[in-house]
Amino acid sequence: MRPSLLTFLGVVLSAFVGISGVQAQHIHLIDGNLSALKGNGSINIQFDYDNMRVGKYDKEADYISAKRQEYNSKNPGRGDTWAQEWVSDRKSRFEPKFTDLFVKEWGGGLSASAKYTLIIKTTYTEPGYNIAISSHSAEISGEAWIVETANPSNVIAKISFTNAPGRTFMGNDYDTGVRISESYAVLGKNLGKWIRKES
């Protein structure tokens, strides 16, 4: 085998090990039970980003302000565009990624009129970074509440999730939205499997 090919395979293996070695995601029930979901063929899904910490910032607004100023100082207008995308990525990227994989793994359907609603409350986001020579995966943590759709104050179960990692296999994730969307994809897949198994 030629040295150049060995080098290439080494890089690919290193990338795989790096992705596999990120801090493992944890999901566990913290209150209530999932028995109510048994026999229900559909669920409603909502997302809540209130009171979310981002990276080293306790308040998301402070993170957005800092990044907007940083990007605008280098390229006027870029920071404003970035701030808009930071919010719009939720509907266009994160939520569809989560929903598609959750429904697939859970095995049920999606309906706004379902008896129960799953609320994904993201309380922490690590955006990560990728500057080619160095990278850090994105990561999200928070709680998933299952509530009665007609009476949201009736919480059926509370589930915690931590360290849902986000990174593409070959590391082509220079865009923050790409990395974070992969975190939601991982969460959707794993939470769907977990609820199917536990309910």
Image: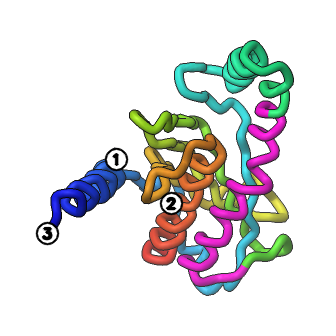
Q: Residue at label 3?
A: 1
Q: Is residue 174 magenta?
A: no
Between the residue at mark 2 and the residue at mark 3, the CA separation in whole angstroms equals 36 Å
Q: Measuring 83% from the left and 33% from the top, which residue is drawn there?
A: 81
> Which mark sits nearer the N-terminus, 3 or 1?
3
Under circle 1, the secondary element is: loop
Q: Position of residue 178 (x, y in %)?
A: 62, 50
- Crowd band around label 3 with a 10 angstrom C-alpha radius: few (<14), some (14–19), many (20+): few
Q: Residue at label 1?
A: 22
Residue kind at label 1, given as amino acid type: Val
Residue kind at label 2, given as amino acid type: Val
Mark 2 or mark 3, which is nearer to you? 3
Q: Measuring 47% from the left and 65% from the top, which residue is drawn there?
A: 190
Residue closest to the eye, 75 or 106: 75
Secondary structure character of the magenta stretch overall: helix
Residue closest to the eye, 187 or 180: 180
> Which mark sits nearer the N-terminus, 2 or 3?
3
- Crowd band around label 1 with a 10 angstrom C-alpha radius: few (<14), some (14–19), many (20+): some
Q: Position of residue 94 (x, y in %)?
A: 68, 54
Between the residue at mark 1 and the residue at mark 2, the CA separation in whole angstroms equals 12 Å
Magenta part of the protein: which range? 82-109
Q: Residue at label 2?
A: 186
159 shown above or below 43: above
> Which mark sits nearer the N-terminus, 1 or 2?
1
